[in-house]
Image: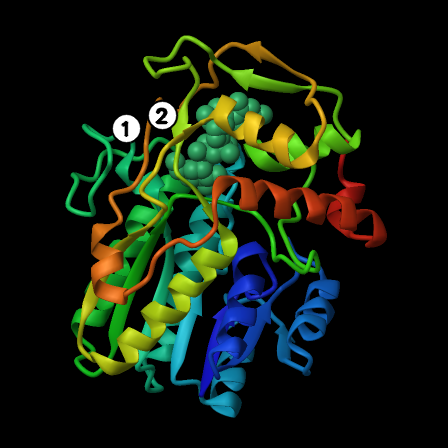
């Protein structure tokens, strides 16, 4: 069964391609390789031991995407293709509205003419803004978005809800990710940050390997046990498996719309992450404290009861597993030449 993966060469997309193949599906990757690398496709093939189909195309290109859909005739879609840098979205909001909203609309216009039985959308816990309480449930109120990026996820969810209400034989699953980290245990695929990473874990691994001098922990005076922010860090392979489970459930239960948190249900502070990293890498990390980062939510982690019940899914990897795999990946990256690296300072 063919499943179209838009943005399938990206961090979460590539791990989902592997998980799909492991579960008997055939992923068809469409990616413009703007923020991803062609070697990722080769490495997916090394992991699964077979060739996979991929197209270098932007999902905003209606003509090309229509031809791909007509040729491949997938029964499911997992839609990852989007820009995701919170800070960049503040500086360049139109890029985000163009790629995350307009291209989504263009894409839906095309899939309207073919039968997609199960559609899974890559959403984010950013839709919750600063939650009134943690763990946060899917029923929590949606607050005004902090960034254009966050707003595109809120709008994307709404557009898809409205679109799929009028498609009675298709199902929609909106997956709200918490903080995806880690890498494939093989060390062949992982996150490829462009330029200076803004996310914690790639910053940690790049500091440990010597690409960055020192990690700054943003704030130590939050109202949390150790004063640093709390997040729900989820291994990318667990997240990838959640996509496969969501897709499968959608194929079985047509005509349903579900919104599910994907997290471990546990919070970890920035210092917890550093401690876990130092343990698995057996080295001290050069870090210090700096002021709070504007826009950071002090504490957010998921209530994952719903996804556990609906999809019979659970997170299998620990925080230490996540950091061990991220660290392996960072060390392996020395072997690969990739364009995003050239953009680093
Ligand atoms: N942090 C540091 N130093 C760094 C980088 C991060 O201390 O150099 C801290 C942050 O202040 C925060 C925590 O590490 O407390 C996690 O920060 P990340 O940037 O890794 O992740 P965020 O929780 O800020 O952002 C993530 C995703 C976004 C998504 C958001 C939703 O990256 O795409 O969650 O809350 F929108």
Number of numbered discs? 2
Q: Position of residue 322 (x, y in %)?
A: 55, 45
Near-viewer residue (48 or 195): 48
Q: Who comes first in sequence, dot 1 or dot 2?
A: 1
Q: Which residue is mark 2?
A: 297
Q: Under tag 1, what secondary structure?
A: loop
Q: Position of residue 229 (x, y in %)?
A: 41, 22
Q: Position of residue 344 (x, y in %)?
A: 76, 36
User: From the image, which quarter does the N terminus lie in?
Assistant: bottom left
Q: Residue at x 68, y 42 (%)?
A: 327
Q: Residues within 10 Å of mark 1 (few under 14, many from 20)?
A: many
Q: Residue at x 26, y 55 (%)?
A: 260
Q: Which residue is mark 1?
A: 130
Q: Residues within 10 Å of mark 2 (few under 14, many from 20)?
A: some
Task: Let me know if residue 93 appears in the view.
Answer: no
Distance of mark 1 from mark 2, alpha carbons? 6 Å
User: From the image, which quarter does the C terminus lie in?
Assistant: top right
Q: Residue at x 78, y 52 (%)?
A: 338
Q: Is residue 141 above or below residue 67?
A: above
Near-viewer residue (133 or 37): 133
Q: Is residue 266 above or below residue 27?
A: above
């Amino acid at each position: 069964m063919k499943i179209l993966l838009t943005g399938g060469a990206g961090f979460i997309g590539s791990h989902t391609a592997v998980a799909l193949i492991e579960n008997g599906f055939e992923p068809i990757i469409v990616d413009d390789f703007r923020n991803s690398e062609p070697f990722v496709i080769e490495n997916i093939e090394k992991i699964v031991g077979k060739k996979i189909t991929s197209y270098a195309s932007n999902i905003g290109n209606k003509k090309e995407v229509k031809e791909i859909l007509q040729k491949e005739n997938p029964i499911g879609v997992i839609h990852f293709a989007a820009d995701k840098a919170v800070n960049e979205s503040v500086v360049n909001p139109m890029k985000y509205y163009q790629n995350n909203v307009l291209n989504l609309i263009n894409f839906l216009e095309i899939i309207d003419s073919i039968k997609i039985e199960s559609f899974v959308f890559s959403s984010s816990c950013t839709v919750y803004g600063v939650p009134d309480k943690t763990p946060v449930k899917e029923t929590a109120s949606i607050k005004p978005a902090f960034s254009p990026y966050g707003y595109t996820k809120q709008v994307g969810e709404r557009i898809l809800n409205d679109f799929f209400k009028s498609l009675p034989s298709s199902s929609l699953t909106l997956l709200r990710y918490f903080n995806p980290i880690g890498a494939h245990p093989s060390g062949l695929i992982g996150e490829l940050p462009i330029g200076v990473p803004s996310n914690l874990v790639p910053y940690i691994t790049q500091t440990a390997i010597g690409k960055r001098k020192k990690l700054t922990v943003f704030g130590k005076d939050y109202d949390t046990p150790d004063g640093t922010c709390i997040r729900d860090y989820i291994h990318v392979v667990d997240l990838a498996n959640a996509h496969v489970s969501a897709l499968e459930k959608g194929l079985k239960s047509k005509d349903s719309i579900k919104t599910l948190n994907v997290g471990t249900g546990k919070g970890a502070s920035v210092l917890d992450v550093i401690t876990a990293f130092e343990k698995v890498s057996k080295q001290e990390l050069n870090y210090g404290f700096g002021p709070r980062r504007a826009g950071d939510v002090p504490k957010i982690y998921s209530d994952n009861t719903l996804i556990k019940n609906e999809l019979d899914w659970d997170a299998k990897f620990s925080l230490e597993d996540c950091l061990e795999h991220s660290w392996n990946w960072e060390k392996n990256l020395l072997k690969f030449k990739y364009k995003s690296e050239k953009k680093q300072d």
